[in-house]
Amino acid sequence: MVHKTFHVNNDINNDVLSICNCCKCCCEGSRPNLKYPFVHSTNYLAKINQDFCKGSGICVEKCSNEAIILNDDKKAEINKEYCIGCGVCAYFCPEGAISMLEGPRVVRILPPRRIL
């Protein structure tokens, strides 16, 4: 997995505040737990090889940002707008269908809408 670092004012040139391993149970930077908009600086993006994907759904379950869905063909698909490149999906994929593409990106995520 890729460790996520948090920097002062979300500026990668500033000091590191904390390090996360991107679990959705407690990470305040994961989409299900967001209370405020969040900016992620990352160097990776998950890519799914549709030929290898068997549709187990483990990647959907493990993704901390709800960036993966199973499409109508029961194959995993990435939503690039939510993928922070943590690599959790690639680590847990039993088919090895997920790889990590390198390249700097900024991902801005809004909290999910909550019905009151």
Image (spheres, rainbow, N blue to C red):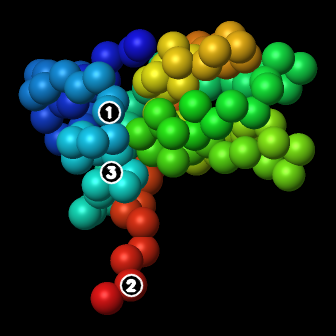
User: Is the residue 20 above or below the residue 40 in the image?
Assistant: above
**Amino acid type shown at disc 1:** Cys
Q: Residue 81 carries which label?
A: none
- Say what secondary structure mark 3 lies in: strand
**Which residue is at the front of the view, 5 or 24?**
24
The N terminus, quarter of image? top left
Label whose residue precedes the other's in the sequence (3 or 2): 3
Question: What SS does tag 2 mark?
Answer: loop
Task: Indicate which disc residue 115 carries.
Answer: 2
Mark 3 highlights which residue? 38
Q: In this view, does 45 lie above or below 95?
A: below
Q: Residue at x 19, y 30 (%)?
A: 7
Asked if residue 51 lies left or right of residue 11, the reply is: right
Q: Say which amino acid is labelled 3.
A: Phe
| Residue located beneath label 1 in the image | 23
Q: Residue at x 73, y 25 (%)?
A: 48
Distance Cα–Cα, label 1 vs label 2: 24 Å
